Image: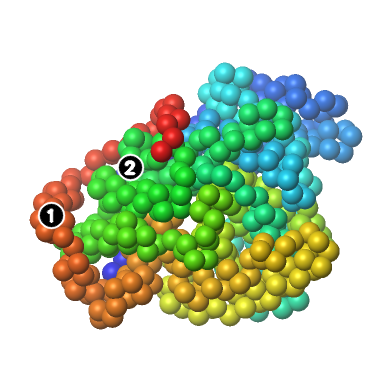
Amino acid sequence: MKPRMHFDNIAWEESERITDNWVEWLLADEVTLRAIGHLILKHRSGVPEELGDPKAGYFNISFRMKYVDGGSAIIRFPKPGATMFPEEKIRNEVAAIRYIQENTSIPMPFILHRGTAEESPPGMGPFIIMEYIDHETNMSRALNMPGLGIEDRPRLDPNVDAGKLEILYGQFADILLQLNKLSLPRIGSLEQVDDFTYDVARRPLSIHMNELVRLGTLPRSSLPNGTFGSASSYFDALAELHIEHLTHQRNDAIDSATDCRRKYVARQLFRKLSSDRRLTAPTRHPDSTSFRLWCDDLRPSNVLLNADLQIVGVIDWEFTYAAPAEFSSAPPWWLLLEQPEYWPDGIEEWTKVYDHRLETFLKVLTKREETLIESGRLSEEQRLSEHMRESWRSGDFWVSYAARKNFAFDAIFWQKLDERFFGPAGIPEESWEDRIGLLNGKQKQDMESFVERKLEEMKSRVLAWEPDEESEPRVHI
């Protein structure tokens, strides 16, 4: 069985081609580079000293302008080909950063200006200009296994000093506790109404929705188009997205009829679990009208440290939205730096190593909670440690993970969810056959025609992609 669902390789190549061509044009166009420098100076006063070379991340490219006064400003543009919703992504991120700055003490970049494509040099798209946060390293580098290069996936150093780990875990715990105190009335992205007012008015644009369009060739029309009033309705939407993903990914979605049936069965059963309200945890989260701010990309690589390993900034708040409490009540996946579906020795081995590190994290989290409660800055009801411990013990951690992570869904469902919800059924590679009986008559009938269509698609490789951003509706559901 595949450890995860593959990306559509044709779409991936097209995505990279667009990005690479754009970056090549940018670096060769001195007029645009000068215009970028002038744009920064328009919104950050001072005597400029140097505009540095661009730094590329996964979704963005940024330029740093240094000033004679010792300060710096960053201008950041979403990369075409990588970011499917650049205007929406930037608008959501700016609102999230300002909201978090006003309601927490988490160190964040100060936003000098958010600009639309119309304000930008031709071909550059929307942008954010921020004060640069001076730092020595980031938390991922501080915890990464020695010997791994920048091209390697990160992995927690198995010999990391225990004291160092507790210091860094503890600081991250503070961030999570502060975010968890921010209660919002609906599931969705924030919109800044005026200088002091924010509203959950737009759909919860997630990193996974971006990747579904980019690497899963999902039509934009299949994505959620509004906010959600309950955790169960959002889980319903995520379950539907899994089905839509398998339906629409044109290439590399399956490798055989058996693989297709296995994936079809998993998604139908996951949707059934959601419709039967078995994916949410109402006994632990009875306040269904209160949701927590969640960032899909909040991880150690986006946490900046000084030379003393103290946090000086947390960056990249794109894909931040109010989400079900089940998300923030699960322990963070990033304790090992690497995601379970990419762990070299498999998900079960990841689970064993993670279980050990989780005890360290929960220990320092509990200490932080006690300190904050004693000082009156946290209430007993705002503790996270017991929720996280129970989420891991019960397996709810894997429910939320599978709901969010489309390309990891199959491995997580068969290894972590199937037996929990439907009882023993043999090894994961074959248990899907025993689960066909749980489908209704129409689902069984539709499965064979679905398999036939997907097998027909395997006979040719076609690019099926929507690269251009469209305006998103604001319909509330």
Q: Is residue 137 left or right of residue 256?
A: right
Which residue is identified by label 2?
217
Residue drawn at x 75%, y 25% is 43
Residue type (three-letter) at the residue carrying disc 1:
Lys
Pick the residue in front: 347 or 64.
347
- Image quadrant where one finds the C terminus: top left
Q: How many marks?
A: 2
Which residue is identified by label 1?
442
Residue 24: x and y in percent read: 52, 33
Any part of residue 449 in sight: yes
Pick the residue in front: 52 or 166.
166
Cα gap from disc 1 to disc 2, whole angstroms: 26 Å
Q: Is residue 123 left or right of residue 445?
A: right
Crowd rating for badge 2 (residues with CA inside 10 Å; few <14, some 14–19, many 20+): many
Residue type (three-letter) at the residue carrying disc 2:
Thr
Residue drawn at x 56%, y 51% is 291
Q: Is residue 102 left or right of residue 204?
A: right
Pick the residue in front: 260 or 419.
419
* Mark sitting earlier along the chain (1/2): 2
- Image quadrant where one finds the N terminus: bottom left
Q: Is residue 233 left or right of residue 43?
A: left
Residue drawn at x 58%, y 68% is 387
Secondary structure, mark 2, is loop
Residue drawn at x 16%, y 56% is 443
Secondary structure, mark 1, is helix
